[in-house]
Image (cartoon, rainbow, N blue to C red):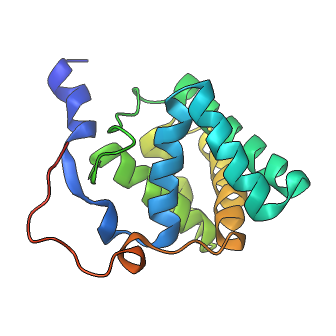
Amino acid sequence: MTDAQQNRGGAPVGFITELGSIEAASVIYLRLWCDGPESQSLVWNDFASGLGPDQGRKAIQSFEELCTLCARHGRRPLMRHSVQCKCIGADESCFANFIATAVDGEREDALLIATLLVRPDVAPLIASLATNFGLALKRMHLASPREMTTSAPSTQTLH
């Protein structure tokens, strides 16, 4: 695989503020999780405070397994932007749409999107994990990024 092919997954395709709450949270938690142990503890704290320790642990286990399977069986490494970046890359957008589709109960479409991320034989497993993770996000009643800002600036820095 060439660098150009791999970098396409990081190409900016939109902004976090354009996403709904489930999609934005999926991208932010993916970035945090992949940032290492210190950031992973922030994810755990969010889920434990939002869902309680038992349900938070179950949600984190689903998310951790989802990330592990994507890394181990991915068609290629998922490209992601830094945690603070306001834009989203193509791979992050795909991941966010995958979680949202799975949580909406659109299983066949979620399976199709999953095959863009991992080998086809792993797709049903990650679709199930995405549903569990997405339902946990729903139970946390997260606000969308556009609800968190009162006015959007006319220009934004990409990275």
Q: Quadrant of residue 65?
A: top right
Residue extending farthest front:
150
| Residue closest to the eye, 6 or 12 | 12
Count of number-bearing discs: 0
Q: Up-down: is 9 above or below 135? A: above
Q: Position of residue 111 (x, y in %)?
A: 56, 55
Residue 114 horizontal/vertical position (percent): 51, 48
Q: Residue at x 73, y 58 (%)?
A: 132
| Front residue (pair 109, 64) | 64
Given the current orientation, which residue lies at the most extreme left position? 155
Relative to 139, residue 59 above or below: above
In the rendered image, residue 147, in percent from the top left (x then y), is placed at: 41, 80
Residue 123: percent from the left, percent from the top?
59, 44
In the picture shown, does residue 44 fall above or below 106?
above
Q: Is residue 112 visible?
A: no
Q: Quadrant of the C terminus?
A: top left
Residue drawn 44% across the image and 61% down it:
24
Q: Quadrant of residue 62?
A: top right
Quadrant of the snapshot with the N terminus: top left
State whether residue 28 appears in this view.
yes
- The answer to whether residue 91 is left or right of residue 103 is left
Residue in the foreground of this view, choosing between 22 and 146: 146
Q: Residue drawn 67% across and 60% down?
A: 131
Image point 8% across, 64% down: which residue? 155
Q: Is residue 157 left or right of residue 45?
A: left
- Asked which quadrant contains residue 106, the reply is bottom right
Q: Is residue 110 above or below residue 65?
A: below
